[in-house]
Image (tube, rainbow, N blue to C red):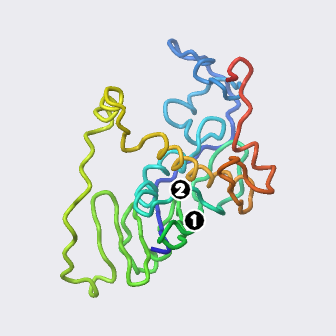
């Protein structure tokens, strides 16, 4: 596979910071909830769920579901660290995350696997789906190869073009089903066995996903140095990679 299109139609967002300052509800420790984030007055627009869409608290749609959706391609194609990341969307809002965004991640060759481009379409489908080259599943993952395409989500799969692959019988499953997050965690505690999404894997996946937000916020393509955890020749990205903690919450 040389290209992968991933799309999700989930698109929510925030807006400007509210001006009113309603009282903190009983039972909520607002200072504790804020944690290391910059101090601001309580407002119900942040809780219980909309915090995802404020830069001080979350990473928007990408931070919310990006790891869930891009995990499939990340695992199947043995991806790790992207070489470059470029993102486009509406003008960057200083407070809130975008509803729509397109991110292009470039990966170098991995062993006998060729370089690959992974494109994230947030709030819209892949152009290939829009042109009718693939069914417009919601969400969808489209693996584009030299001989055809594979459209999948976590419950369906289809080889394209359908006429070319009519009668194809898929191989028998070889990957065992997970015993579940909780059972894997307990087994890891008892035996030291790695979980399916252990920190070595999930950390690299999360790093890759969130670099899309970094590229979007700096407004240009970035070249990634995974060893230094820095965007090469892009000092303005530092503020979005490591945040300054609020006084009293430093590590």
How far across and how far down the image is residue 220, in percent? 74, 61
Q: Which residue is at 60% across, 43% downward?
A: 14
Q: Quadrant of the N terminus?
A: bottom left
Report the front residue among 94 and 241. Answer: 241
> To which quarter of the image does residue 195 belong?
top left
Q: Are marks 2 and 1 in contact (CB under 8 Å)?
A: yes
Residue denoted by label 1? 107
Count of numbered tags:
2
How far across and how far down the image is residue 10, in percent? 46, 54
Measure the alpha-carbon separation of dots 2 and 1.
8 Å
> Does the rendering let one see residue 126?
no
- Seen in the picture, residue 152 relative to 217 is either above or below; the reply is below
Which SS class for mark 1? strand
Q: Residues within 10 Å of mark 2 (few under 14, many from 20)?
A: some
Report the front residue among 19 and 215. Answer: 215
How far across and how far down the image is residue 200, in percent? 49, 43
Q: Residues within 10 Å of mark 1 (few under 14, many from 20)?
A: some
Which SS class for mark 2? loop
Q: Which residue is at 58% across, 42% downward?
A: 53
Residue found at the far top of this picture: 26
Q: Which residue is at 53% across, 30% downward?
A: 47
Residue denoted by label 2? 80
Going by the image, does 30 lie left or right of 133? Answer: right
């Amino acid at each position: 596979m040389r290209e992968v299109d991933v799309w999700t139609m989930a698109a929510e967002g925030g807006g400007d910071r509210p001006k009113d300052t309603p009282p903190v509800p009983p039972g909520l420790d607002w200072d504790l909830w804020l944690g290391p984030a910059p101090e601001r007055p309580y407002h119900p627009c942040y809780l219980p769920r909309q915090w995802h869409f404020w830069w001080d608290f979350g990473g928007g749609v990408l931070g919310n579901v990006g790891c869930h959706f891009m995990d499939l391609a990340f695992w199947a194609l043995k991806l790790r660290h992207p070489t470059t990341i470029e993102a486009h969307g509406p003008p960057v809002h200083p407070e809130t995350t975008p509803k729509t965004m397109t991110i292009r991640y470039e990966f170098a060759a991995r062993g006998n696997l060729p370089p690959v481009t992974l494109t994230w379409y947030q709030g819209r489908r892949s152009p290939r789906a829009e042109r009718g080259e693939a069914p417009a599943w919601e969400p969808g993952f489209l693996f584009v190869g030299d001989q055809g395409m594979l459209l999948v989500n976590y419950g369906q799969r289809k080889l394209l073009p359908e006429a070319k692959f009519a009668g194809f019988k898929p191989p028998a499953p070889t990957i065992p089903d997970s015993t579940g997050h909780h059972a894997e965690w307990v087994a890891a505690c008892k035996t030291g066995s790695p979980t399916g999404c252990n920190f070595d894997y999930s950390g690299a996946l999360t790093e890759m996903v969130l670099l899309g937000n970094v590229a979007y916020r700096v407004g240009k393509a970035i070249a990634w140095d995974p060893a230094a955890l820095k965007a090469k020749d892009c000092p303005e990205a530092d503020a979005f990679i490591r945040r300054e903690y609020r006084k009293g919450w430093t590590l």
